[in-house]
C-alpha cells in the first residue's frame, strides 16, 4: 500500500504540472463550448443525481423534471455521464423493451431543451443491476422492525421494488463490455476490519427496550448481507489516449438509523471499497469470482453520489470516510475540487447538494475524482447564484434535483 501511495503521489505531481489553471467556479461548462471546446479539454465526465427519476417519467416526453435535468446536462455536454437515482426498469419489470437510460437519452438528452443548446446522442449506455428492492431468498429482518422479508427495509438496499434508486451510465466513447467488473454480491463481512454492528459484540445495542432505533446484523444475517446498497461497478471506457476505468457506486446515506450508527458504518465501508480497489487489495472479488483490485498502472475516474462529505458535520458524521478515503488519499486527485457560485454564496463553494430531507443543508457528496496520473484540466458544479437568471438555468437546476451536476475535464495524456 505504501509503495503504491508513493507512486500515485509522484504521478499526481507529474500530471499536475500539465494541468491548465482554468476557472474552477463556473456555473456550467458552456464557456468551453466554443472553438476551443474540443481543444485540450480531454474527456468531460459528469455525475448527476436526478432525485428519484422514475420509469413513467423518462419513457415518454413531457415530464418537467426530466426536461430540466436534460437541460442541465446539455449545458455541460459531458462525454461520459452517470445518472444516480434513475430507476432500473429492467429489474422493475416495466417497459422492458427499452432501458430507462436509453429512453432518457432518446426522449430528453437528444432533444435540445432550449434554443441554442445541442442535443446529446450517446451511442453507448449501461444500466447496472442494483441491490435496491432485492430481497434475499430467505426472510430476514434486516431493519429490526419485527416484519421479516418486507420491502423496503429488508432488501439488500433500501427500495420499494427491484431497481429503485438505481443508476445508469451514458457515454460517447465505447465501453469495453467484456472487461466490466461488478461487485453487487460482494459480502460486507468479507471486507477485512469492517465496521458491521454485530449482535453480541461489545457496545452493540440489540434490545429494543433499550433503544428501539437499534439496527444490527445477526450471525446468520452476516452470511448473506451485501456490502453495496446499489452496486459497485468498474466500467472501462476506450477514450482518446487509452482506457480509463469509470468507478461507479451510490453508497447508502449515513442516516435514518439510531444508536448503532448502522448506516453510517455501512456508508463508511461502501466508500472505503473503491479506495481499497484502486489500491489493489486482494480480498476483493467480483460477481464472476475474480479476485483482486485494479491494476497499479490503470487510470480511473470515480463518479457519483457517495453520500459522504469531507470535514463537515463531524459530530453527526464522526467516521468521515470522504476525508479519509478521498481527500487524504494520494490515490485520488482532490487538489482542486469543483466549485460553483451557488455554493460560494452558501459558504461552501464545493457544495453539490442543497435542501433535501433537511431544509437548507449544504454539503459536498457528489464527485468526479480522477486518478493522479490523469491531467485535470477544468471542473465545476452547475449551480448559478440566485442573482443569476440567465436563460432560466437556475430554475432548471432547482427543478431537476436537490443535487447539482458535477463535471470535470480529464485528459489521459498531458498533450491531449
Image (cartoon, helix red, strand yellow):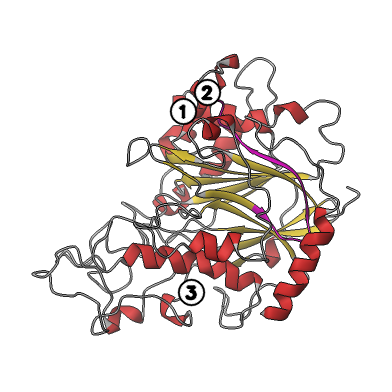
How far apart in space, not on screen, are marks 1 and 3 (Cα)?
36 Å
First in sequence, mark 3 or 2: give its number: 3
Res 295 seen here: no
Whole-percent x and y of residue 104? 55, 36
Q: Which residue occupies the extreme left position in the image?
A: 209
Kindly check if marks 2 and 1 are in contact, taking CB atoms under 8 A apart as contact. yes
Q: Can see residue 70?
A: yes
Determine whether 29 is above or below 325 in the image.
above
Residue that appears at 45% across and 27% down: 399
Rendered image: mark on residue 394? 2
Give left or right: position of 70 versus 75: left
Q: Residues within 10 Å of mark 2 (few under 14, many from 20)?
A: many
Marks 3/2: CA–CA distance: 40 Å
Say what secondary structure mark 3 lies in.
loop
Quarter of the figure that contains the N terminus? bottom right
Which label belongs to residue 188? none
Horizontal side of residue 85 vs 255, given as left or right? right
Query: Hey, which quadrant is residue 41 in on the image?
Result: top right
Q: Secondary structure at mark 2?
A: helix
382 part of magenta stretch: yes
Task: Report the magenta residues as a range.
Answer: 369-385
Per the image, the residue denoted by label 1 is 398
Question: Which label belongs to residue 186?
Answer: 3
The kind of secondary structure element at disc 1 is helix
Residue 171 in the image: x percent, y percent? 69, 46
* Camera-side mark, 3 or 2: 2
Amino acid at each position: 500500500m505504501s509503495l503504491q501511495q508513493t507512486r500515485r503521489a509522484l504521478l499526481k505531481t507529474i500530471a499536475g504540472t500539465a494541468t491548465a489553471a482554468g476557472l474552477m467556479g463556473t456555473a456550467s461548462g458552456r464557456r468551453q463550448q466554443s472553438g476551443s471546446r474540443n481543444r485540450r479539454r480531454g474527456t468531460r465526465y459528469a455525475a448527476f443525481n436526478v432525485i428519484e427519476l422514475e420509469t413513467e417519467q423518462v419513457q415518454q416526453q413531457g415530464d418537467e423534471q426530466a426536461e430540466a435535468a436534460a437541460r442541465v446536462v446539455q449545458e455541460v455536454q459531458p462525454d461520459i455521464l452517470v445518472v444516480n437515482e434513475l430507476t432500473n426498469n429492467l429489474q422493475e419489470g416495466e417497459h422492458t423493451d427499452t432501458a430507462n437510460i436509453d429512453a432518457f437519452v432518446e426522449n430528453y438528452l437528444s432533444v435540445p431543451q432550449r434554443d441554442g443548446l445541442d442535443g446529446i446522442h450517446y451511442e453507448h449506455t449501461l444500466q447496472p443491476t442494483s441491490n435496491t428492492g432485492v430481497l434475499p431468498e430467505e426472510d430476514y429482518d434486516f431493519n429490526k422492525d419485527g416484519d421479516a422479508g418486507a420491502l423496503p427495509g429488508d432488501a439488500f438496499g433500501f427500495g420499494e421494488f427491484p431497481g429503485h434508486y438505481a443508476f445508469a451510465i451514458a457515454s460517447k466513447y465505447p465501453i469495453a463490455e467484456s472487461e466490466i467488473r461488478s461487485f453487487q454480491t460482494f459480502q460486507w463481512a468479507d471486507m477485512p476490519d469492517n465496521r458491521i454492528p454485530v449482535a453480541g459484540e461489545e457496545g452493540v445495542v440489540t434490545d429494543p427496550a433499550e433503544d428501539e432505533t437499534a439496527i444490527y446484523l445477526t450471525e446468520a444475517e452476516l452470511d448473506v448481507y451485501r456490502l453495496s446498497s446499489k452496486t459497485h461497478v468498474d466500467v472501462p471506457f476506450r477514450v482518446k489516449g487509452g482506457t480509463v476505468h469509470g468507478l461507479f457506486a451510490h453508497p447508502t446515506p449515513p442516516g435514518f438509523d439510531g444508536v448503532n450508527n448502522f448506516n453510517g458504518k455501512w456508508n463508511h465501508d461502501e466508500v472505503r471499497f473503491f479506495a481499497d480497489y484502486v489500491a489493489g487489495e486482494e480480498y476483493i472479488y467480483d460477481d464472476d469470482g475474480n479476485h483482486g483490485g485494479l491494476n497499479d498502472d490503470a487510470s480511473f475516474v470515480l463518479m457519483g453520489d457517495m453520500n459522504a462529505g469531507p470535514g463537515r458535520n463531524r459530530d453527526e458524521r464522526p467516521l468521515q470516510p470522504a476525508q479519509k478515503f478521498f481527500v487524504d488519499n494520494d490515490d485520488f486527485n482532490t487538489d482542486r475540487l469543483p466549485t460553483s457560485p451557488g455554493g460560494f454564496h452558501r459558504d461552501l463553494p464545493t457544495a453539490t447538494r442543497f435542501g433535501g430531507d433537511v431544509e437548507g443543508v449544504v454539503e459536498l457528496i457528489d464527485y468526479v475524482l480522477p486518478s493522479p496520473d490523469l491531467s485535470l484540466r477544468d471542473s465545476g458544479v452547475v449551480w448559478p447564484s440566485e442573482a443569476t437568471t440567465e436563460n432560466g438555468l437556475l430554475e432548471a437546476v432547482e427543478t431537476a434535483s436537490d443535487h447539482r451536476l458535477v463535471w470535470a475535464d480529464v485528459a489521459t495524456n498531458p498533450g491531449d
